[in-house]
Image (spheres, helix red, strand yellow):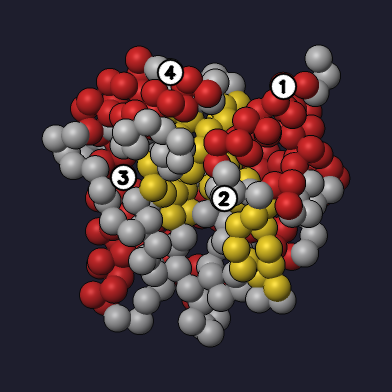
Amino acid sequence: MDRLRFGTAGIPYDTPNRNTINGIKYVRKLGLESMELEFVRSVNISEDAAPEIKKTAKANDVVLTCHAPYFINLNAIEKPKIYASMHRILNSAKIANLCGGYSVTFHAGFYLKMDPKKVFENIRKRIKEISKKLIDEGNNIWIRPEVTGKFSQFGTIEEILKLSQEIENVMPCVDFAHQHAKTGKYNTYEEFSEILESIEKSLGKEGLNNMHIHVSGIEYTEKGERRHLILDDSDMNYKDLMKAFKDYKIKGVVTCESPVIDEDSLLMQRTYNKIYK
């Protein structure tokens, strides 16, 4: 990635004639540089529609990522659920790649009260199979298990970094709001720096030069994430987060998942650009 780009999780709400192609154009009109295709309930772009989306994104210099469906559990007990989960990730990666997408992210699974080490092995095995199948098909899109926000969900920063070390074409999707919600911490400049340093230690400079990030305000309880909030209506310390991004010279995509995706994307972009000017 050439620089750090800011954008929206989905089509901005004020997009005229709201669809994916017009969303990409509107993102560029706003001055943003990325957009996440939201496949959260289903993969809603066809193979036939993908080439025009790719062409539009390239013409507008907008980087596309995608979020695979929420109905994924690579640690499911029932084999049909595992196969369905793998299919959803593979299909998301296929369509995102046809759209010229940079990476596909997903929530990898649930612990189901099992030993976390066993859960890690189960999920690693299945992501490895997904990676191999995509590479065999000539699809080199980045596969991004996400840092999750609930204690019932697999996806600590340590687990995601370990998967990224061990499997080809796998890198983290670091959701800083989820990390904050799960721990009640990781909301200071020093703590943000600690995360970035752990990425560099685990994955080298490539880790910092190839990031897929989610940020929003977040409401949380003792169980972790409850719901996303507007940045300025939350305790999310996005100003220090932007400073850490700048100081560590990271590159990649920052996707805003707040209830006002375009406004808060622009807020983070402006904050980031003002630092050390």
Secondary structure under tag 2 reads loop
Comparing marks 2 and 4, which lies closer to the viewer? Answer: 2
Percent position of residue 22, x then y: 34, 28
Q: Nearer the viewer, mark 4 or mark 3?
A: 4
* Secondary structure of residue under mark 1: helix
What's the CA distance linking mark 4 and mark 3?
A: 20 Å
Q: Position of residue 257 (x, y in %)?
A: 55, 48
- Residue that carries the numbered disc 4 in the rendered image: 61
For marks 1 and 4 on the same chain, the one whose residue lies earlier in the sequence = 4
- Of circles 3 and 2, the one toward us is 2
Give the residue displayed 68% in from the left and 63% down from the top. 219
**Few, some or many residues within 10 Å of mark 1 (<14, 14–19, 20+):** few
Would residue 65 be found to the left or right of residue 98 on screen? right
Mark 3, Cα crowd under 10 Å, few <14 / some 14-19 / many 20+, is many
The residue to which callout 3 is attached is: 93
Contact, mark 3 vs mark 2 (Cβ under 8 Å): no
Say which residue appears at 61% left-offset and 68% top-offset. Answer: 226
Report crowding for label 4: few under 14, some 14 to 19, many 20 or more residues within 10 A (C-alpha): some
Residue type indicated by callout 1 = Asn
For the residues labelled 3 and 2, the Cα–Cα distance comes to: 26 Å
Q: Which residue is mark 2?
A: 259
Q: Amino acid at mark 3?
A: Ala
Residue beneath disc 1: 273
Amino acid, disc 4? Asp
Q: Position of residue 6 (x, y in %)?
A: 57, 31
